[in-house]
Amino acid sequence: MNSNLPTTFWRWIPFLFNEYLPMFVKGAAITFYISVIGTLMGLIIGLLAGIIQTIPVEINDNPLKKTVLYVVKTLLKVYIEFFRGTPMMVQAMIVYYGLMQVFQIDLSSMTAGLLVVSINTGAYMAETVRGGIISIDEGQTEAAKALGMTHFRTMYSIVLPQAFRNIIPQIGNNLITNIKDTSVLSAIAVPELFLAGKSASTTYFRYFEVYFIICIVYLTMTLTVSRLLRMLENKLDGPSSYELAEEFQEEITADLKETFVI
């Protein structure tokens, strides 16, 4: 063995970090890319599924509409239960190998990984969005219906803007979970952070030191994302003081005085 190699744990850490820095950076970038894109795609799927699940069925509705809604909602329930009830690693295996074997669809490992994360997140986000929609006062929906708004118009203009604020913490939780769970995609050879660590650890057989570095990188990414999402929540909450409201009230009062002055 090379006598120039480190001999202690704390010397191996900087040595391995410098030795495999490009590999770690590339793996972390792929992990972050799949996590963010997968979460965004999952949010879109969840929004559509959540809206469809909350479409009301009236007694006087067309039988065809009732039948279509029943079939679509049933399929959504099957989709949600399947992807929430099975491990992501198993889903990755089914998508990556199953699509090729059954349908002759040859996906790259990256594409398959991104697809799995998206549809898996969509299943969780569908229930999150549905819960967010239900949390909004029904009186607002009834008022929109009285004005002649369609269900989708009501969702877009009134309900979803409020529900979105309520589900931001859960969106953040899903993103953080995806950052960690992308490690299972190493099973289908996605070159994410965990696979990079696995490759680096076999050169010098220093598994503990390499995975300690990987652990710190994962922790750094999740803490950073968590902090950014907390800042977004605070931004959406608006200022905690009443200064802006008082200034606005003063402007309105001044305008009224000018309007009604004789």
Image (cartoon, helix red, strand yellow):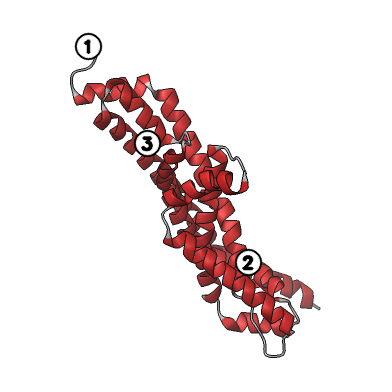
* Residue for point 69% across, 71% down: 152
The x and y percentages for residue 15 are 30, 20
* Residue for point 64% across, 81% down: 56
Callout 1 amino acid: Met
Q: Disc 2 to disc 1, how far (Cα)?
A: 75 Å
Q: Name the residue under label 1.
A: 1
Q: Which residue lies furthest to the right in this view?
A: 262
User: Which is more foreground, mark 2 or mark 1?
Assistant: 1
Q: At numbered mark 3, what does the secondary structure look like: helix, strand or loop?
A: helix
Q: Residue furthest top?
A: 3
Callout 3 amino acid: Val
Q: Can residue 205 be seen in this view?
A: yes
Q: At numbered mark 1, what does the secondary structure look like: helix, strand or loop?
A: loop
* Residue for point 63% across, 77% down: 70
Q: Name the residue under label 2.
A: 248
Give the quadrant of residue 139.
Answer: bottom right
Callout 2 amino acid: Phe
Q: Name the residue under label 3.
A: 217
Which of the marked residues, 2 or 1, is nearer the chain's N terminus?
1
Give the quadrant of residue 141.
Answer: bottom right
Which of the marked residues, 3 or 2, is nearer the chain's N terminus?
3
Q: Are marks 3 and 2 in contact (CB under 8 Å)?
A: no
- Left/right placement of residue 257 relative to residue 210 reads right
Q: Disc 3 to disc 1, how far (Cα)?
A: 29 Å
Residue 70 lies, with reference to residue 25, above or below; the image says below
Q: Can residue 238 be seen in this view?
A: no
Question: Which quadrant: the N terminus?
Answer: top left
Q: Disc 3 to disc 2, how far (Cα)?
A: 46 Å
Q: Which of 187 and 256 is in front in this view?
A: 187
Which of the marked residues, 3 or 1, is nearer the chain's N terminus?
1
Q: Nearer the viewer, residue 236 or 29?
A: 29
Residue 51 lies, with reference to residue 42, above or below; the image says below
